[in-house]
Image (cartoon, rainbow, N blue to C red):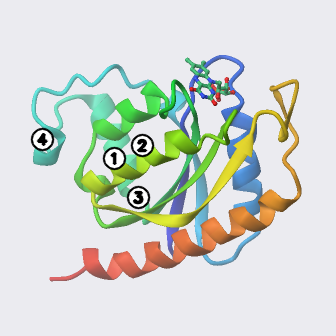
Amino acid sequence: MTKVAIILGSTRPGRNGEAVAKWVYDIASRRGDAEFELVDLLDYNLPHLDEAMPPSLGQYANEHTKQWAAKIAEFDAYIFVTPEYNHSTSGALKNAIDFLYAEWNNKAAGFVSYGSAGGTRAVEHLRLIAGELQLADVRAQVALSLFHDFENFSVFKPGPQHEGTLNTVLDQTVTWGKALATVRNKG
Ligand SMILES: Cc1cc2nc3c(=O)[nH]c(=O)nc-3n(C[C@H](O)[C@H](O)[C@H](O)COP(=O)(O)O)c2cc1C
């Protein structure tokens, strides 16, 4: 069965990302087309990138890198749940992405973002990063507004329209995740 990770991309105490990622997971889990798992960056405790060799060589020296690589390698596709920090994604998520290379290649990615402008600028940066990693990013995205989808900017109350959009993101991500498995399994 196709496996999809929902990656929680913020690590701050009191992060809004936790409620958003749980909402994504709850809706995704009701689908029968893939297995979904919530992957919380906090559980991997990655330092700033501390590998001597470029990730594209796949020669990981540190135990934390090996554990992170083994987890990411399990999946066919990813839903990145990202905040917007200074018009980009979080440093923690960028760092976690930078640790690896082959584990991301020829897989699919969808995005769920939040911020004052829906986190859309963070996702535009992530799409550029995905290109370098040969990670195929789907068109649809969920953009949650800090003004309209959170009470007091902190209690997550998503508008009802977002569930349909999330399912479109999941449809596209699962479809491409399945298709790209055939590319990875060639030869
Ligand atoms: C360092 C920092 C920079 C931020 N920069 C932006 C920004 O450029 N645009 C925006 O819409 N929100 C910005 N925000 C607000 C965040 O989108 C908001 O705090 C969100 O809840 C952060 O996600 P988190 O709670 O999961 O960490 C920023 C927040 C932080 C902490």
Frontmost residue, 33 versus 175? 175
Where 4 sits versus 125, above or below? below
Residue position for label 2 = 125
Q: Secondary structure at mark 2?
A: helix
Looking at this view, name the residue that lies furthest to the top: 13
At 33% from the left edge and 30% from the top edge, which residue is drawn? 64
Residue position for label 3 = 74
Task: Say what amino acid the circle numbered 4 marks.
Answer: Gln
Task: Say what amino acid the circle numbered 2 marks.
Answer: His
Residue position for label 1 = 129
Q: Earlier in the sequence, mark 1 or mark 4?
A: 4
Frontmost residue, 132 versus 8? 132
**Number of marks in the image?**
4
User: Mark 2 and mark 1 in contact (Cβ < 8 Å)?
Assistant: yes
Residue position for label 4 = 59
**Quadrant of the image where one finds ligand 1:** top right
Mark 2 vs mark 4, CA separation in Å: 27 Å
Mark 3 vs mark 4, CA separation in Å: 18 Å
Q: Earlier in the sequence, mark 2 or mark 4?
A: 4
- How far across and down, in percent of the image, does residue 41 sit? 50, 33
**Numbered tag placed on residue 56 in the rendering:** none
Q: Earlier in the sequence, mark 2 or mark 3?
A: 3
In-image side of 155 versus 12 (left or right): right
